[in-house]
Image (tube, rainbow, N blue to C red):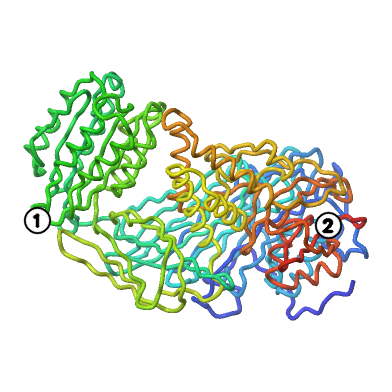
Amino acid sequence: MNARPVSAPARRLPSATRGRYPGVHRPWHPWLVLWMALLLLLIWPLPAHAQDVILPPPFPPPPAPPPPVPMIPTVGVDRYQVDVQIDGRIASVHLSQVFRNQGNQPVEGTYLFPLPPDAAVGGFQMRVDGQVIEGELLPADQARRIYQDVVRRYQDPALLQYLGRGLFQANLFPIPPGESRTVELRYTQLIGQQNGLAYFRFPLATPQHRDGRLGALEIRVDLVNQPGLRILYSPSHPIDVSRPADDQARVTFSQQDVRPESDFELYFSTAEDAVGLNLLSYRPAGEDGYFVLLAAPAIQAAAPELVRRDLVLVLDVSGSMEGGKLEQARAAAHFIVDHLNPGDRFNLISFSTGVRLWQPGLQPVADETRQGAHAWIDGLQAGGSTDINRALLEALAQIQPEPEAEGRPAYILFLTDGLPTQGETDAWRIVDNAIRHAPAHRSVRLFTFGVGYDVNTDLLDTVSSRLQGRSSYVRPDQRIDEAVSQFYAGISAPVLADLALDFGEGVATYDLFPYPLPDLFAGEQLVVAGRYQQSGTITVTLQGQVNGVTQIYPFPDQTLVSAGGEPFVARLWATRKIGALLEAIRRNGASQEAIDAIVTLSLRYGIVTPYTSYLVQEPSSVAAAPRPLVPGGQGGAGPVPLPADAMPRAYGPVAQASVAAEAEAVAALPAAGEAAVVASQARSQIAEATVVPEHEAVRFVNGKTFGRQGQVPGPDGEGLILWVDTAYEESMAVETVIFGSPRYFQLAEDPDMAQWLAISPELVVVVDAGHAIRITTRIEQ
């Protein structure tokens, strides 16, 4: 094969570089989105006396047709640690990996690091066990040949997504059997901007058709010198955030024995105003758009800036609370009393067979009232039945009507460990009573805590939702005081109540989640997902109440895109929409309209939940024996071996049957018991998701969803996973393309298609209505 002309020679980097961006001959472009790319270690087996062997060139031109050369899976990654410091708009990245030779022969290879496209990246330095290693920066044309050779030789299309980018490469020393090498890479890059948000991305996704598990994955991002830091959001990973100062943050994520399914992404922004707000949007061709709105105040607020509240804490002291549960409930109550804000008013209520009030009415926060409240809490004793209805009505009666309330929102925290056994015991009549007795013209938020499994989840979920709050559950293996204290810490400092959003004249939005909007709290972040009709540059106005005074925050120059954008935005909206549909099914029963909507959303956006488990099972087995997922786990099974002549199967027919069965199960589930609590928590996680749940059997790539349908034998007998576009129908006309053929690389020239081809050498992708392409390594197919 003739080599393509190279526009520029390879440049060898010195062992130590100088300057902030050495070796990068392009100006800084702050508007560019910077990417890092996939790390790939290519290895060859060596005899025991490796010094006597002359290695072949790393990437010789393959013969035509190229024989498949499988990668020998003898090198594992024990640890993968990413440390990033983002100072202003400069990111300094330190990647440390521990590679272990798990085979019985020495191995060595070439380390490839695709460069971000059109990005100001530099300062590369690589060390192996502390020794500086020289490397080369290759221009895009020269890197393209290497990418394509890797795809051909190793039946690994993952690098196709990096066609058109430059490359950093370095040769690694041999790793003896049973030993390890610590490989470190350092570089700097300029952080890009997207619609007012700074954006950082680090590649974690590994080639999907081989085992790419990491022994330990740790990511730490330190943000410094970010005055007015407000928004911190990762659409890809459930991050932990600590805020040591208003201009600093530490973002962490860690997991053991993990196969990364998506790259790590982080958005952040700064604002001089008290509240920061940003929009991200996505609009497929011919459809209304999707948006995610992020709003966050400062991490701390001075006392005059806090919203003054009326708060009523209601504690179940029935006989079932005796012992450790009551002791923990007392500790939670003490914590709340200690963390009330100046200007708040509060009262305490206990209930069992009857109801007991600490004071006849709400009391101001002062040293004397705190002392009295603590003494009353210490005197609580357990005994009697559970009159939930009367306790709710007494709590609502504490909420004074306007104008005495002075514009205060009212919070009721209601903790119980049992079913209603005294007074009114019908759950739906209790809900109706609470709604009818809620004070008019007052904003009431009811937060319920169900302790243990002997609670009515329908009652607690519905009454809290109807009164603008939410339900939480404390499992038997959890401590009540820790769960309640952690929750209260998040709502302890409200800075804006009774929120409303306005997207400007002529812009129609709909299907917003959550609805109604919750209050905004210091140190917390509001994430709203919705749909929009009109595109363009708009001004978003956030309005709320602070102690009876209306506060208005305009945010100009926000963009709702007319085409393209960030596909994860649609996935997040679809996840929350499915959560809302499941809640409706639980309340009203399964309707065909709700089932159809769940099927459409889950197929299109790859939303894997305990109620859409058909996505992670073999299509032929779903209808017969669906396997429910465990919330928070991977569930399902690994890839099933398929015969060489196996045909791809469409998802649509089995999706309807599976979701219909799951919907009926949701509607029929008992209201109390362990299964009811687990199901309620699962539905809440879906409805309140800020990160789309991922599963190793589903890929969402560039706006398309692909499902894993089994493992087919490759030309050399190695199993290759077959991935099928969920839009595929068996009636479609199918073009078969041999992996690595000229037609294959012709398809790969299209940037969108290259992203899909990078999934696997065994693939079905739908190109338009009625037509699909089948990629395969087997010529006989």
Left/right of residue 51 with respect to residue 345 in the rendered view:
right
Can you give x and y, in whole percent of width and height, for residue 160 in the image? 73, 65
Can you give x and y, in whole percent of width and height, for residue 33 in the image? 54, 71
For the residues labelled 1 and 2, the Cα–Cα distance comes to 73 Å
Residue at screen point 34% across, 45% down: 470
Left/right of residue 544 with respect to residue 209 in the rendered view:
left
The mark found on residue 403 in the picture is 1
Marks 1 and 2 close (CB-CB < 8 Å) = no
Can you give x and y, in whole percent of width and height, for residue 658 in the image? 63, 43
Closer to the chain start, of discs 1 and 2, is 1
Residue at screen point 8% across, 52% down: 404
Kindly identify the amino acid type of the residue bearing the numbered disc 1. Pro
Residue at screen point 46% across, 62% down: 267
Kindly identify the amino acid type of the residue bearing the numbered disc 2. Thr
Left/right of residue 756 with respect to residue 541 in the rendered view:
right
Q: Of residues 513 and 196, which is closer to you in this image?
A: 513
Tell me if residue 227 comes above or below residue 522 in the rendering: below
Q: Residues within 10 Å of mark 1 (few under 14, many from 20)?
A: few
Q: Which residue is under mark 2?
A: 776
Can you give x and y, in whole percent of width and height, for residue 628 in the image? 59, 37
Left/right of residue 622 with respect to residue 122 in the rendered view:
right
Report whether residue 252 is seen. no
Q: Secondary structure at mark 1?
A: loop
Q: Quadrant of residue 601?
A: bottom right
